[in-house]
Image (tube, helix red, strand yellow):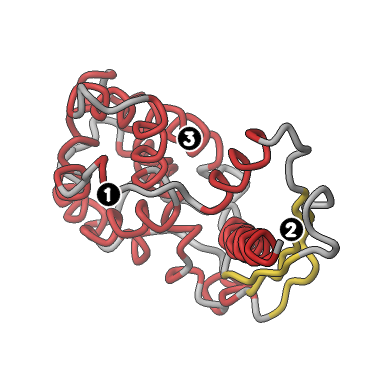
Amino acid sequence: MRMDDNLRMKSFSLKYHFKDEQLMTLALTHRSASQNHNERLEYLGDALLGLIIAEDLFKRFPRADEGQLTRLRASVVNSDALFSVGQQFDIGSLVILGEGEKKTGGSKRVSIAANALEALVGAIYLDSDYATCAKVVGELFHDLLTELDPSAIEKDAKTALQELLQGKGLHLPHYQVKSITGPPHDRLFEVSCSVKSLLNKPTLGTGETRRKGEQAAARQALISIFEESSCD
């Protein structure tokens, strides 16, 4: 499969021109459209992004400790951030979807766009080399990286809850998806967070992804723990 003129034009916005056009097409092919899809490239791109961003942060913030660097990386390498970066070249409109996925709004789904961006990173690496791939990633993530401030990055709720329990020598929380509602392109996950050592009943949280639901549930758990400790 060769890229059409639209994909050729968009490749310039990606700040990289593919030598092997089929690699770019594969990176943008969702599993709903073909058995030859982008998930293997997504796996590779995810690993590359983690390394490239970690290396950039390590050099950019020489005084940041491990915890700060980890939280900074998590603020950059996540579905919402990847979706935002992908919007620079309207990645959602480029993803090749099956008819069913098109009808349910797949081109606007955060997870599909984020996964496609990871696949593109993997494809760029295979089409060139690590240095070139790192350069392209640096350009794509430039604005996001330059806005980072280690002192302003707070621990996410799940991390804060985990560290609180570890500090007390208690068991880690248990998360469970209680329900998934809504159409495929607009899911809502309800997740419970059990902290049996400190709370009598699980807390609940909702979000458009399982991860966001877990964060919301962890946040409620922290609030409940704080309220109960204040009453003691």
Q: Amino acid at mark 1?
A: Ala
**Mark 3 closeness class: few <14, some 14–19, many ≥20 residues within 10 Å:** many
Residue occupying image coordinates x 28% and y 22%: 55
Which residue is found at the position 14% from the left and 44% from the top?
146
Asked if residue 122 shows in the view, the reply is no
Of the numbered discs in the image, which one, if any, rests on residue 152? 1
Which comes before the other along the chain, label 2 or label 3?
3
Image position, residue 226 (x, y; %): 61, 60
- Residue position marked by numbered label 2 in the rendering: 193
Camera-near label (1 vs 3) is 1
The structure residue drawn at horizontal position 62% and vertical position 74%, both measured from the top left corner, is 187
27 vs 181, nearest the viewer: 181
Using the rendered view, name the quadrant where residue 200 is placed: bottom right
- Label located before the other in sequence (1 or 3): 3
Q: Is the Cβ of the residue at disc 2 closer than 8 Å to that at disc 1?
A: no
Residue 50 lies, in percent from the top left, at 40, 31
Residue underneath mark 3? 41
Q: Quadrant of the C terminus?
A: bottom right
Find the distance from the CA under tag 2 to the CA under tag 3. 33 Å
**Amino acid beneath label 3:** Leu
105 left or right of 178?
A: left
> Does residue 75 sit above or below 226 in this rendering?
above
Q: Which mark is residue 20?
A: none
